[in-house]
Image: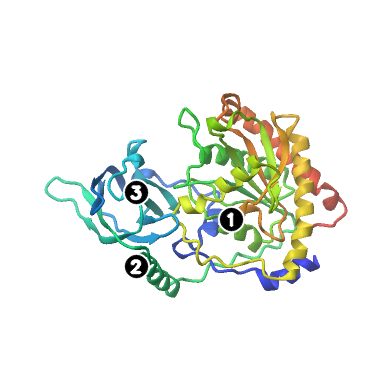
Amino acid sequence: MAIRAAIAAVAIGAAWGGALLGIAASAGQAARAPDVAVAEYPVAKAVRVGGDEKQTRFVMDFDHKVDLAAFTLADPYRVVVDLPQVNFRLPKDAGEQGRGLIKAFRYGLIMQGGSRIVLDTNGPVKVDKSFVMPPENGQPAKIVLDLSPTDRDSFMRAIASENRVARASKPEPPAPKSDSDPRPLIVLDAGHGGIDTGTHGPGGELEKDVVLAFAKDLRDKLEAGDKYRVSMTRSDDTFIPLNDRVRYARSRNASLFVSIHADALPKREGQADGATVYTLSEKASDAEAARLAENENRADVIAGVDLTAEPNDVANILVDLAQRETKTFSLQFAKAAVGELKHTARLHKHPLKSAGFVVLRAPDVPSVLIELGYMSDKDDLSHLSSPGWRERNAGAVAQAIDDFFGPRLAGAGLRR
């Protein structure tokens, strides 16, 4: 397609972010790799926060020594601690142990081989010390961070210095392998992952687990038909930054990008249920769509990703022209998805919506975001947790993909 070829010269190949380089590529390539036993990884066994507004200490215990790297981020103020891959065995409410300068913290897998702790702070802080203590005298290994307050100007200067070092040492991202297979490439994007759990069900169910299970069912359905190539932005409990999900699809010339989520609605906002299919729009179709997009677009903030150096991909009139065409194709697929899901799933009262989701911003890849249902609704949650329900609705989405590509495949007008 002429527009796709033209914008490829001006828009593909943007730089990837800092310590998260290569996440999307490794996630896709590892789609069928066997899981590594968690016993091989260091175990985080306990955590403590002590001190006050003048000095706060964060301590986490491990079964053996680990290395760490700590840096700070602004808006909101955070301290990020990167570790090798860790098996976190902490109480469920561990992250709520705020004290002194630390409001709360979270932790999880950030990439294959790497874990992360993000400390939310009450204001700008400086890391006075960050060090590792080996196990000795019957005591476990520890990581220790000492924080003290600082002013915003000093905080921002420290971030700028850290960013200069990170950019100077940043390796080039791996180029995707060329593929002569003429079948359309479908990229499935299971939302959230790793340190970003997504929404929670009342019984402790996690959105990141529910949507990954559905994405795998959909992948299996599509591959069984042998009409498409299928790739996943993540196939395990790994965090992928939002823009890397988009770049993953674009760099491989994907023919369709399907992001899968399962929302929750706060009690104060009333009751909602059923599946919804979203397309990209700068102006949200309603307040609920705007709220959902805002929540989903915070994933990188939750995971401690530095957004200050993100490149501007949409910088040419050709991109704008391509995006108009792409939005048309995206809406066509969204309508096909709603048409098939109505036979197998309970739909939201307004099942076709639009909002400004970051993951739908590829200007040359038709993209939709499917909200499978509301984890805050007991009936929806029951469905989402059911393997039978997931299989039926994965079949419905697979049929929608057939409906979307059928005329083009039959007429040899394959859109690459």
Closer to the eye: label 2 or 1: 2
Q: Which residue is mark 2?
A: 154
Residue 89, can we see it?
no
Q: Circle 3 — which element?
A: loop
Q: Are marks 2 and 3 in contact (CB under 8 Å)?
A: no
Residue 120 lies, in percent from the top left, at 38, 50
Q: Residues within 10 Å of mark 2 (few under 14, many from 20)?
A: few
Residue type, label 1: Arg
Camera-side residue of 248 and 413: 248
Label 2: state its secondary structure: helix
Residue 130, how many percent across, how many down?
26, 59
Crowding near the residue tagged with mark 1, few <14, some 14–19, many ≥20 C-alpha atoms within 10 Å: many
* Image spot of residue 75 (x, y percent): 45, 57
The residue identified by callout 3 is 41
Return the mark for residue 162.
none
Quick one: label 2 or label 3, which is nearer the N terminus?
Answer: 3
Residue 19 position, x and y percent, is 44, 63
The nearer-to-camera label among 3 and 1 is 1
Res 182 → quadrant? bottom right
Q: Mark 3 and mark 1: span between their CA atoms?
A: 26 Å
Q: Is residue 205 above or below residue 192?
A: above
**Is 244 rendered above or below residue 47?**
below
Q: Look at mark 1 in the image and give the residue it sits on.
A: 245
